[in-house]
C-alpha cells in the first residue's frame, strides 16, 4: 500500500471507529495525522500555553489586560506550525479569534498573512452581547466542509467549543495547544483530540522533524 493509500485507509478507520463507538478523545496520533493529511477536516486548535498569572479584563484590544502567551507558548505555537508543514497537512482557510492569545497562536504558527482574525471565534468572556452569534458562527465553521483535499483551521478557546458542540472538553482532553479534529457535516463528528506534544512526537517518529 502506498503512502496515499495508507492515509486514506487510516482516515477511513477513524470514521469507522466513530460510527461504532461514538466520539473519540485522545485518539491515536498516527490515525489523526493520517486523517488531516487526507484533508476534508476542521481542526479546532486551542490557543498555545499562556501565563496563568495574567488576569483577563474582557477588553478586546487591551493586550496588557489579557492572559497572553507565555514564552513556552510562543515556542509551542511556532512548533505547531512547523510540524503541520513538515507533515504536509493541507490547509486552506485559517481563522483566529481576536483575543491576543488566539490571534498570536495563529499568526506565530501560520504567518499573519495567512490568518483571518474574526469575532466568530471570540472568547466567551469577551463576547458580551455577541455570545449567541459567536456560538452559531463557530458551529457553522464546524459544519461547513472545506474545499476538497484541504482542512480548515479554527484557532480559539476551549469553552466556546464546548458551547458550540454541546460536548465537554476538559483540560485533560484539550489542554492549551491541543487540537480537536472534526469531520464536518450537519452534525460535526469529533474524530479525536491530540496535544501539541503528541503531534510533534508523531512528526519526529516519521522523520519529518529532527528530534
Image (tube, rainbow, N blue to C red):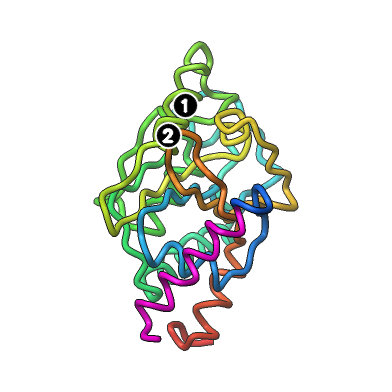
Q: Nearer the viewer, residue 98 or 62?
A: 98
Q: Residue at x 68, y 52 (%)?
A: 21
Whole-number angstrom distance, CA of label 1 to CA of label 2 = 7 Å
Q: Residue at x 53, y 36 (%)?
A: 64
- Image quadrant where one finds the N terminus: bottom left
Q: Is residue 79 magenta?
A: no
Q: Which residue is mark 2?
A: 98
Label 2: element kind: loop
Residue 61 x/y as whole percent: 43, 29
Residue 2 x/y as whole percent: 36, 85
Q: Residue at x 72, y 48 (%)?
A: 171
Residue 124 x/y as whole percent: 57, 26
- Judged from this view, the residue extending furthest toward the top is 129
Asked whether disc 1 touches disc 2, contact meaning CB atoms under 8 Å apart, the reply is yes
**N-terminal-most mark, 1 or 2:** 1
Instruction: Examine the rendered structure and indicate whether residue 15 appears above or below residue 202.
Output: above
- Image quadrant where one finds the C terminus: bottom right
Query: Dot 1: few (<14), some (14–19), or many (≥20) neighbours within 10 Å?
Result: some
Q: Residue at x 47, y 26 (%)?
A: 60
Label 1: element kind: loop
Q: Which residues are magenta?
A: 1-18
Q: Is residue 8 magenta?
A: yes
Displayed quadrant of residue 24: bottom right
Instruction: Examine the rendered structure and indicate whether residue 92 appears above or below residue 85.
Output: above
The answer to whether residue 112 is left or right of residue 168 is: left
Query: Dot 2: few (<14), some (14–19), or many (≥20) neighbours within 10 Å?
Result: many
The answer to whether residue 34 is left or right of residue 29 is: left
Please identify the dominant SS of the magenta region: helix
Q: Which residue is mark 1?
A: 60
Amino acid at each position: 500500500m502506498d503512502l496515499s493509500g495508507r492515509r486514506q485507509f487510516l482516515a477511513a478507520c477513524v470514521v469507522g471507529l466513530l460510527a461504532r463507538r461514538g466520539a473519540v478523545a485522545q485518539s491515536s496520533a498516527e490515525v489523526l495525522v493520517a486523517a488531516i493529511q487526507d484533508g476534508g477536516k476542521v481542526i479546532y486548535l486551542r490557543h498555545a500555553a499562556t501565563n496563568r498569572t495574567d488576569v483577563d479584563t474582557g477588553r478586546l484590544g487591551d493586550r496588557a489586560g489579557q492572559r497572553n502567551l507565555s514564552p513556552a507558548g510562543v515556542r509551542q505555537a511556532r512548533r505547531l506550525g512547523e510540524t503541520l508543514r513538515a507533515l504536509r497537512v493541507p490547509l486552506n482557510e485559517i481563522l483566529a479569534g481576536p483575543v491576543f492569545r488566539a490571534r498570536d497562536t495563529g499568526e506565530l504558527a501560520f504567518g499573519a498573512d495567512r490568518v483571518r482574525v474574526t469575532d466568530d471565534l471570540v472568547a466567551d468572556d469577551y463576547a458580551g452581547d455577541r455570545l449567541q452569534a459567536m456560538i452559531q458562527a463557530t458551529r457553522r465553521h464546524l459544519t461547513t466542509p472545506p474545499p476538497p483535499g484541504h482542512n480548515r483551521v479554527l484557532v480559539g478557546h476551549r469553552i466556546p467549543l464546548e458551547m458550540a458542540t454541546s460536548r465537554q472538553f476538559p483540560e485533560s482532553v484539550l489542554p492549551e495547544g491541543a487540537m480537536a479534529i472534526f469531520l464536518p457535516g450537519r452534525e460535526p463528528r469529533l474524530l479525536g483530540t491530540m496535544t501539541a506534544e503528541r503531534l510533534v512526537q508523531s512528526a519526529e517518529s516519521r522523520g519529518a522533524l529532527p528530534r
